Image (cartoon, rainbow, N blue to C red):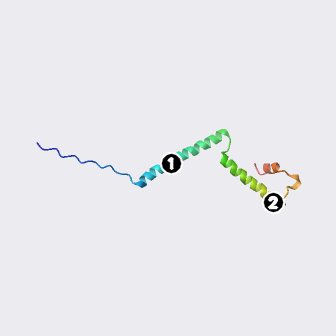
Amino acid sequence: MEEAKPRRKRRKKKKSTAAKFKKELKLLLIITLLCFFAAIILSFITGKVPGFVDSVVEKQVSGAINRQMKDFGGGAPGGMDLNKLRRQMGR
């Protein structure tokens, strides 16, 4: 009888760091997109814009109001108040 030859040990293939990075990046992008779509759906359901977008729009409107007030010479023409001017600007 012949003696059995010892079996070779199989080496585990190591993934390169680039492959690990790509896999993690894909996973993080998927999670980010899911959260983004969930936020969009919730904002449409509640009918409210997220706070960040609302604050950016508010800053733009207030800047436009200040520019118009400067163009008018520092005062509102014809006794126009700020609330009326904001309504005209779409806010």
Q: In this view, does 85 lie to the left or right of 10?
A: right
Q: In which quarter of the image is residue 43?
A: top right
Secondary structure of the residue carrying tag 2 is helix
Give residue 33's position: percent from left, percent from top.
Answer: 55, 46
Name the image quarter holding the N terminus: top left
Pointer 1 residue: 28
Q: Sequence-wise, which precedes: disc 2 or disc 1?
A: 1
Task: Identify the residue at image location x=65%, y=39%.
Answer: 45
Residues marked 2 and 1 touching at CB (< 8 Å): no
- State the residue at coordinates (58%, 44%): 37
Q: What residue type is labelled 1?
A: Leu
- Residue 10: x and y in percent read 28, 48
From this view, report whether residue 31 is shown above or below residue 77: above
Question: How would you rate the neighbour count of disc 2 (Cα within 10 Å): few for under 14, some for 14-19, many for 20 or more?
Answer: few
- Spatial CA span between label 2 and label 1: 47 Å
> Mark 2 — residue?
70
Farthest top residue in view: 45
Residue 68 placement (x, y as % from top left): 80, 57
Q: Which residue is drawn at 67% across and 49% down?
A: 53
Residue 55 left/right relative to 31: right
Circle 2: residue type: Lys
